[in-house]
Amino acid sequence: QVQLVESGGGLVQAGGSLRLSCAASGSIFSFLGMGWYRQTPGKECELVAGISSGGSAYYVDSVKGRFTISRDNAKNTLYLHMNSLKPEDTARYYCAPTRLATLEKFGSWGQGTQVTVSS
C-alpha cells in the first residue's frame, strides 16, 4: 500500500499562488492514477484534479485554468500548482490514488495540508 505525505499548504492572499506536494512511498506510484481532493467542514470531499499514470489530467470546473496537476515519477511525487487563489479554495487538501475513468478514490490519503486564502 502506498503511503502519502502532503505538504506545501499555508496562508496566502487572494490572487496568490501555492504549490502542494504529495510524496509517496513504494515502487508502484508511477503505475497509479492520482488525485488531489479538498474538504471543508460541513462539505463533502471534492476531487479537485486527477492525473493518470500516463499524464492525462482532469480538473473540476471551479479550478480549470487556475490549477495544474503534475507528477514526477522519478521522485514519487505528485504536485498541485495553484494560481489565482480565491477564498473559496480554502480547505484541507489531500492526495490519494484515484481511478480517472470513474473519478473514484481507491486508496488511503495522508494527513493533508491546509490551504487558507484570505480576501
Image (tube, rainbow, N blue to C red):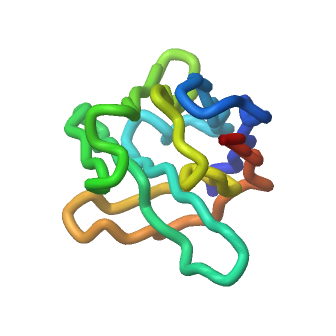
Query: Residue at horizontal 68%, vertical 38%?
Result: 25
Q: Is residue 63 above or below residue 106?
A: above
Q: Position of residue 45 (x, y in %)?
A: 55, 72
Left or right placement of residue 84 versus residue 2 in this view? left
Left or right placement of residue 93 versus residue 37 in this view? right
Say if residue 25 shows up in the picture.
yes
Q: Is residue 91 above or below residue 12?
A: below
Left or right placement of residue 62 versus residue 93 in this view? left
Q: Nearer the viewer, residue 113 or 119?
A: 119
- Quadrant in the picture for residue 68: top left
Query: Residue at horizontal 49%, vertical 39%?
Result: 29
Query: Residue at horizontal 63%, vertical 53%?
Result: 94
- Quadrant in the picture for residue 115: top right
Q: Position of residue 51 (x, y in %)?
A: 33, 42
Q: Position of residue 54 (x, y in %)?
A: 23, 34
Q: Position of residue 20 (x, y in %)?
A: 62, 31
Left or right placement of residue 34 versus residue 76 in this view? left
- Give the quadrant of the C terminus: top right
- Quadrant in the picture for residue 71: top left
